[in-house]
Image: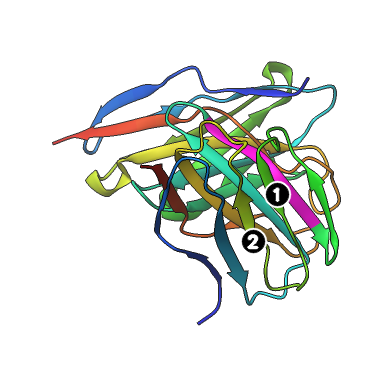
């Protein structure tokens, strides 16, 4: 079964806690992206990675961190520095000049 | 700075009626253009895209969009909507797909409601 998987579907964060969202793909795509979606705001780019061991900040990277140790995986950590983390997080991939394809998303809620 | 505007936050259409969702962009040059659809709590699905060539592009689920350079617009249309078309629709643009630094820039979305 090919595609992009994101886990967990729902994630709860306590005050001051770091949490990590998983994004895995078996499409053999080089580029991977993380977006944040807030109601009425559309999607905003957090981080992206075009190749393994390299990543770049997007428009709203503060309070987030990523790693890209494997082509298949691009985890996003929401750190305690992110003061308003409640949102829907979407991972996307792209192979070459193709369009971006999106995973099913993770909803992060603060306890 | 590049921007995408979807002027309509909500649109209500009767089932079987035609639909047009508006999208305008602000860029120095013609970007690559996309429409995505999102059902509640789900990821985004690509409906159609415009890179170059024929300015009227056909997509999935009976949707089409027309690129108008003079108006910086890329409006989405469907001749007859179905109740299953109720969803959030996003217009997106990108300057350098596959090699660009910035990823997609999205509009804020239009929520489509279908009346029976």
Q: Is residue A45 magenta?
A: yes
Q: Which residue is mark 1?
A: A65
Residue sticking out furthest to the bottom? A1
x and y percentages locating residue A103 in the rendered image? 52, 60
In the image, residue B103 above or below residue A62: below
Question: Under tag 2, what secondary structure?
Answer: loop
Labelled disc at residue B60? none
Quadrant (top left, top right, bottom left, bottom right) of the C terminus of chain A: top left
Q: Is residue A8 visible?
A: yes
A59 to B39, vertically: above or below: above
Q: Nearer the viewer, residue A40 or A69?
A: A69
Location of mark 2 (residue)? A75
Q: Residue at x 85, y 64 (%)?
A: A53
Over which residues does the magenta segment extend? A42-49
Which is the main secondary structure of the residues drawn in magenta?
strand
Residue name at image x 78 percent, y 40 percent? B102
Judging depth in this view, the residue of A15 and A55 nearest the camera is: A15
Left or right: A111 in relation to B73: left
Structural crowding at the residue carrying mark 1, measured as other residues with C-alpha within 10 Å and reported as few (<14), some (14–19) or many (≥20): some
Label 2 chain ID: A
Measure how far apart labels 2 and 1 are at the Cα level.
9 Å
- SS at mark 1? strand
- Up-down relation of residue B61 to residue B87 (above or below): below
């Amino acid at each position: 079964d090919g595609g992009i998987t994101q886990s967990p579907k729902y994630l709860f964060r306590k005050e001051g806690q770091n949490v990590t969202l998983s994004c895995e793909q078996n499409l053999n795509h080089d580029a991977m992206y993380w977006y944040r979606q807030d109601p009425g705001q559309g999607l905003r780019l957090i981080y992206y990675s075009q190749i393994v061991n390299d990543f770049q900040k997007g428009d709203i990277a503060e309070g987030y961190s990523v790693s890209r140790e494997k082509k298949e995986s691009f985890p996003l950590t929401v750190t305690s520095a992110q003061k308003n983390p409640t949102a829907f997080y979407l991972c996307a991939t792209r192979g070459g000049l193709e369009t971006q394809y999106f995973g099913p998303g993770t909803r992060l809620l603060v306890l | 700075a590049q921007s995408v505007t979807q002027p309509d936050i909500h649109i209500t259409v009767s089932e079987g009626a035609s639909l047009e969702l508006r999208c305008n962009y602000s860029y120095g040059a013609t970007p690559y253009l996309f429409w995505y659809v999102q059902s509640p709590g789900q990821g985004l699905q690509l409906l159609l895209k415009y890179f170059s060539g024929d300015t009227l592009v056909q997509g999935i689920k009976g949707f089409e969009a027309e690129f108008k350079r003079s108006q910086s617009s890329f409006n989405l249309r469907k001749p007859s909507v179905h109740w299953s078309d109720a969803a959030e629709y996003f217009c997106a643009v990108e300057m350098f797909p596959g090699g660009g630094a910035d990823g997609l820039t999205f509009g804020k979305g239009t929520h489509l409601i279908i009346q029976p």
